[in-house]
Image: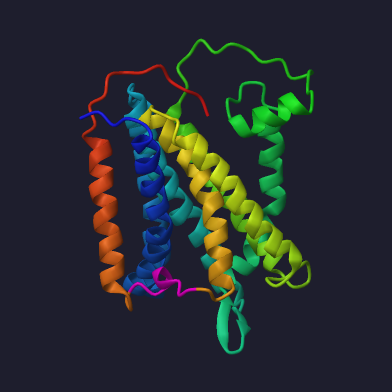
Amino acid sequence: MTIKRPFTGILTFIIVLLIMPLGHAFMILMEKLFGEQYLFPAATLLGFIGVFLLVIGLKKTKELAATIYGFFAGLFIWTGWIEFSFVWTAHHLGIQPLLENGEIVTKPEYLIMPSSLGFLLVLVVYFLFNRQTNCLFFRWFQRNLRMRFIIRVKQSQPRPLAMITAMQFIGVIWFFYIFLLLIYNKSIFGDSHPVTYISFGLSLLWSFYLIVNLLKKSNLAFAIRYSIPTVIIFWNAVEILGRWGFFKEFWIEPSEYVLEMILILVVFIALTGILVFERKKPRKIEVI
């Protein structure tokens, strides 16, 4: 079976898109299933599973396999070690959720997540000044800011695609988590501020531009890596609409919407199966 464009982009976009509600639901189910006593050991184990997948991915020589392992490694490490570390800290400090009209609008862990902004900016600076980066986003800045002092070097060794994919997922989702949390903060802007409306519009426009480019991709592995930022930027608009109350975010209440979550999971497994059993001829590795 050979998947041709634009179906390559459509397939990978949908797969990564379905991860977003499934990831939210998985966190909530973990909290309910393991309880306070076993939740954080389980989250720690989940992060180690992510590292194990990363090690396997680093040993893979095929681009698609390395990318898939890196994708799930990043997902598990982000959920197990990063998101739940904020949950643990909020619980340990006794931080209360943000309430509006008696409803929780921001959970305690997300109230303290912006405290990691400084560390995130350090990583941004590192990648911005990294002469070996192949990230299209940072290379655009290096080129248009005329950063001539950054001398690019040719890479003779194969790129660690599993690590690149995992770090891409963690870095992009972390960045936009903090971005949304900052603009939601009423001491800065607030969810009804014009900046939030502008952010909503720009997220749609930016994601539309990326989707158009994604549909031109024929390499499945590259399309997966390109879909990660595309979906997360698109998801900004989904999150903002949910914040405004345009629809019910049923994935944050998976036990109440079992059928919907099962359908999403079934579609995700089916589409991922198509990727796993894809037998395309090796292609030249595209960079992102």
Q: Nearer the viewer, residue 186 or 56?
A: 186
Where is residue 24 drawn, in percent x and y?
43, 63
User: Seen in the image, is 152 located left or right of residue 162?
Assistant: right
> Please, is residue 92 above or below residue 13 in the view?
below
Q: Residue at image x 32%, y 75%?
A: 257
User: Seen in the image, is 83 located left or right of residue 196?
Assistant: left
In the image as oriented, which residue stretches furthest toward the bottom? Answer: 102
- The span picked out in magenta is 247-254
Magenta-colored segment: predominant secondary structure: loop
Q: How many marks?
A: 0
Q: Nearer the viewer, residue 175 or 285?
A: 285
Q: Is residue 167 visible?
A: no
Q: Is residue 78 visible?
A: yes
> Please, is residue 38 above or below residue 11 in the view?
below
Where is residue 259 drawn, in percent x and y?
26, 71
> Please, is residue 266 above or below residue 141 in the view?
below
Quarter of the rendering containing residue 21: bottom left
Q: Residue at image x 48%, y 73%?
A: 247
Where is residue 168 drawn, in percent x and y?
52, 39
Colouring used for the render: rainbow
Does the magenta run of residues contain 34? no
Q: Nearer the viewer, residue 209 or 155?
A: 209
Where is residue 96 drawn, in percent x and y?
60, 80
Q: Residue at image x 42%, y 52%?
A: 17
Q: In the picture, which quadrant includes the N terminus?
A: top left
Quarter of the rendering containing residue 273: top left
